[in-house]
Amino acid sequence: MSRECATDFKRIKNYINGYRISVNLEEDDFISSLKKMHKCYFSTVTWNAELMHKKDNFLKLNANCNDDIINLISEAASDLGSSLFNWANGNYKASRVMLRISIENFIRGISGIETSDQLTEKNVYKLFDTASTQNIFSDNSAVNQCYNSLRSDYKLLCKDAHTATLQNMAHLSSLADLPTFEKNKSEKAAEVFVRTSKNITTIFNLLFNSFYHKMHHRNKENVINSLSSEVKPLIVSPN
């Protein structure tokens, strides 16, 4: 082991020994972003809990759905949770990657309702190209707007995995890219998280509006709590 490597190993041991995320709670910017993200994620958790608890009722209301579609939609909600976890730990790149996976799983699941081949489509570019032509994403203007936003954010998030820039590359110290609070990266990741979760919640509850209206009344309130005043009436008013 070289002298530099030995020194860096000592630093990483100290980092692990002293690692805790509670210090982030001392940052006003962290709290502000966390509050916004939690509000949106709680909406997602709520409708997903209703979906999993009342899966049989959901399938009766939506005969063109199946277990594979439900699992993909639910997985997208779980991916949002993983994104939030990584964000809270200061692991912003992983947080954004999980957002990307969440969007893909959600679009794949919803798109599979109209075209079953979408459930097994391996080419992601083809997945989105096909989804863009489907009635399920274009018949409702609010759904279409949310879909376009998700696709745009998906392209943005792909840069974290495919673009070799200094922003995404490791530096010389092992500690350089280990989780830590960084205001700029934190805010940018939080913005995409909030936008993604809102779009997913909006699409789900507009497309499956009859299921929304069968939820517990408190859950219905929690589902729309994170959405804009323009979107809420579209969901609350039965289609």
Image (cartoon, rainbow, N blue to C red):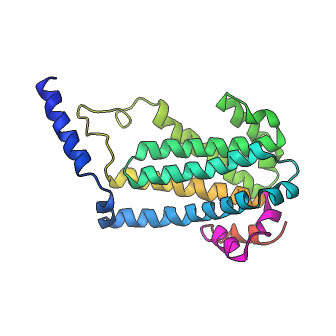
Image: 203 above or below 163:
below
Quadrant in which residue 119 is drawn:
top right
Q: In this picture, which residue range is highlighted in magenta?
A: 208-226
Image: 148 above or below 214:
above
Residue 19: percent from left, percent from top? 27, 51
The tally of labels here is 0
For the residue pair 74 and 237, the one nearer the viewer reads as 74
Residue at 23% over, 52% down: 18
Residue at 62% over, 45% down: 103
Residue at 43% over, 62% down: 33
For the residue pair 229 and 101, the one nearer the viewer reads as 101
- Which secondary structure dominates the residues rendered in magenta? helix
Residue 198: percent from left, percent from top? 61, 59
Residue 222: percent from left, percent from top? 63, 71
Quarter of the image for the N terminus: give it.
top left
Residue 90: percent from left, percent from top? 37, 50
Q: Is residue 172 left or right of residue 111?
A: left
Q: Which residue sits furthest top?
A: 1
Q: Which residue sits furthest bottom?
A: 217
Q: Is residue 115 magenta?
A: no
Image: 165 above or below 68:
above
Residue at 38% over, 32% down: 165
